Image (cartoon, grey):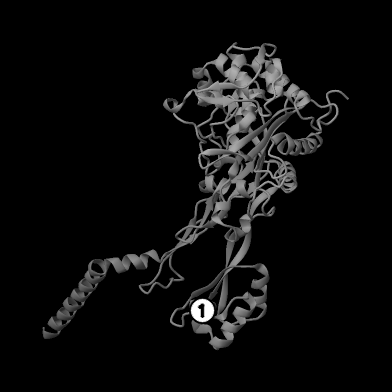
């Protein structure tokens, strides 16, 4: 009987021990258990989506690089180990040693190791090292479309994240969804090889096909670089679009940067001046006011105005750019000779309320909605801050600030039949066999097709009969308008510092492209007609050839 009691007592003690142990792990060490459980999951990182131009030429892809790790307990000669690795990686030995920890089973020594250095490390047969594949962003065209693409950097958690441009705006589409490997582990956090293992694969990021044409982008950047150097400008931008859809075919601004080596550039270089920098459009704004006057039936192209001298508004004198006056001139001639006093006359006919209404209708003072990160809205003062002089100067593009993208979009509305469109950079989003097309989006109709046709003809006349003769390719009809706007310095305009610009389109009867050239502070001449306009026609010649557009008068 005593033996039965002893056995019974033994089972009681054993049972109590189990209960105490379970209480210890499930109640007292619940947090530690959670930490151990969390080690059962290993993330599988997806491949970032690729970016292509409209002809499926790659603009942003991924390269395989390597994470180099060490298992310190397998290292026999630490000094020899560190010396060999630092020599192959071409980094200071002290930086490798700082990552090395004898007490750990596994340590990361370097990330983004190239294929060449990976192969050299493998060939060296260094005990105690290993590799994990890493996917790194690669831009095969370097800085060709830097401002458009943006770049991929690291967030605060060390994860790849898109910044600026397409990479920033579409980061959630490009990044994909991570997967996970779940496995059973013992209390020490070691995987149990015979335990359960569950794998949920990652979903790679979506691919983007842009509206950008790499060949057109190359033309824009090449000519822009030549133009900035030739005209000694501080900065410059070229924007090219399909005016009927506002698909952007090229956007190039300089100075720029190489997105593969973004750490070598200052942060100020990352913003895209085409969408984030405002300037006064000057005379490129005049066709919009002329279109508004014709649409409201306040003027006709062959109406006359007596241009006989300067005029005064709100205590300020307004004169022509060259202080020369032709007497009786038509509305078309006002546009051809870019007469500021003639534009004030048209503004008076239109009325202040209509001037401001059309400025707003053309989209100024509002973001265009383009699918790029970092767009600004430009500057348009509230109605209660407008005075007589402001309405007058606005008719010739001074006193308001616009982005280059706002300006080319508004001008496109003048010549495309009257529709204000939302510009876009992405043409389609692709995920496996699923394709989402980005279609033309009409914001509003501003003018009629009739008014638009009238303006196209007037703008052809402006090129053919303007103050300066341009190198228009023989047999082609090209429309456009120059702009020269003084830059405000310390609250006053500096006549020696200007923004020179030109907006043009071709062929005039059925425009296939519209292009805007903007040069900041050109040094050879302050006038857009002598800097931005010649640069536009150099670009136009290349585009007419590229698109195989035949002359209208062979």
Compared across the picture, whether 290 is left or right of 387 comes to: right
Q: Is residue 2 above or below residue 200?
A: below
Q: Is residue 438 above or below residue 510?
A: below
Which residue is nearer to you in this view: 139 or 517? Answer: 517
Residue 12, given in percent of the width and then of the height, sits at 16, 76
Residue 148, given in percent of the width and then of the height, sits at 61, 45
Task: Quadrant for residue 349, please give it.
Answer: top right
Residue 188, given in percent of the width and then of the height, sits at 37, 74
Asked whether residue 399 is in view, the answer is yes
Q: Is residue 276 above or below residue 125?
A: above
Residue 530, given in percent of the width and then of the height, sits at 74, 37
- Name the residue rendered at 63%, 50% in the picture: 146
Which residue is nearer to you in this view: 24 or 284? Answer: 284
Compared across the picture, whether 535 is left or right of 413 comes to: right
Q: Which residue is mark 1?
A: 71
Which quarter shows the C terminus?
top right
């Amino acid at each position: 009987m005593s033996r039965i009691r002893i056995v019974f007592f033994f089972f009681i003690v054993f049972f109590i021990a189990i209960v105490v142990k379970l209480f210890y792990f499930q109640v007292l060490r619940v947090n530690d258990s959670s930490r151990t459980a969390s080690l059962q999951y290993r993330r599988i990182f997806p491949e970032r989506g690729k970016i292509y131009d409209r002809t499926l030429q790659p603009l942003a892809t991924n390269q395989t690089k390597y994470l180099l790790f060490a298992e310190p307990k397998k290292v026999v000669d630490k000094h020899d180990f560190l010396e060999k690795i630092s020599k192959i990686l071409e980094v200071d030995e002290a930086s490798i040693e700082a990552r090395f920890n004898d007490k750990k089973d596994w340590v990361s020594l370097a990330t983004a190791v190239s294929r060449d250095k990976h192969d050299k490390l493998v060939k060296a047969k260094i005990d105690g090292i290993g590799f994990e594949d890493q996917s790194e962003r690669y831009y095969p065209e370097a800085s060709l479309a830097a401002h458009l693409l943006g770049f991929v950097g690291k967030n605060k958690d060390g994860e790849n994240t898109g910044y600026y441009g397409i990479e920033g705006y579409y980061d959630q589409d490009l990044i994909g969804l991570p997967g996970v490997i779940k496995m059973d582990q013992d209390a020490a956090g070691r995987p149990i090889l015979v335990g359960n293992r569950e794998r949920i694969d990652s979903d790679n990021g979506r691919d983007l096909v842009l509206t950008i044409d790499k060949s057109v982008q190359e033309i824009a950047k090449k000519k822009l670089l030549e133009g900035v150097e030739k005209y000694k400008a501080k900065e410059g931008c070229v924007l090219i679009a399909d005016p009927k859809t506002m698909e952007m075919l090229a956007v190039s601004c300089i100075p720029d940067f190489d997105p593969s080596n973004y750490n070598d550039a200052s942060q100020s270089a990352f913003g895209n001046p085409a969408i984030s920098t405002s300037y006064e459009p000057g005379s490129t704004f005049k066709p919009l006011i002329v279109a508004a006057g014709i649409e409201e039936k306040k003027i006709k192209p062959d109406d006359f105005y007596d241009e006989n001298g300067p005029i005064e508004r709100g205590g300020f004198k307004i004169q022509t750019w060259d202080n020369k006056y032709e007497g009786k001139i038509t509305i078309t001639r006002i546009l051809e000779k870019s007469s500021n006093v003639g534009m004030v006359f048209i503004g008076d006919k239109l009325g202040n309320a209509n001037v401001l209404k059309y400025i707003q209708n053309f989209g100024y003072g509002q973001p265009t909605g383009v699918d790029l990160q970092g767009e600004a809205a430009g500057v348009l003062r509230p109605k209660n801050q407008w005075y007589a002089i402001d309405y007058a100067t606005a008719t010739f593009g001074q006193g308001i600030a616009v982005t280059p993208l706002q300006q080319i979009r508004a001008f496109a509305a003048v010549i495309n039949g009257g529709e204000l469109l939302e510009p876009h950079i992405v043409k389609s989003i692709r995920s496996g066999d699923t394709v989402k097309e980005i279609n033309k989006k009409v914001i509003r109709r501003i003018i009629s097709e009739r008014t638009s046709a009238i303006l196209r003809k007037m703008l052809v006349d402006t090129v053919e009969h303007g103050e300066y003769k341009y190198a228009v390719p023989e047999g082609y009809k090209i429309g456009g308008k120059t702009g020269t706007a003084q830059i405000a310095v310390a609250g006053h305009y500096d006549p020696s510092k200007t923004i020179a610009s030109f907006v043009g389109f071709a062929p005039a009867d059925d425009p296939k492209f519209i292009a805007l050239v903007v040069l900041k502070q050109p040094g050879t001449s302050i006038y857009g007609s002598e800097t931005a306009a010649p640069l536009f026609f150099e670009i136009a010649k290349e585009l007419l050839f590229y698109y195989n557009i035949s002359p209208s008068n062979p």
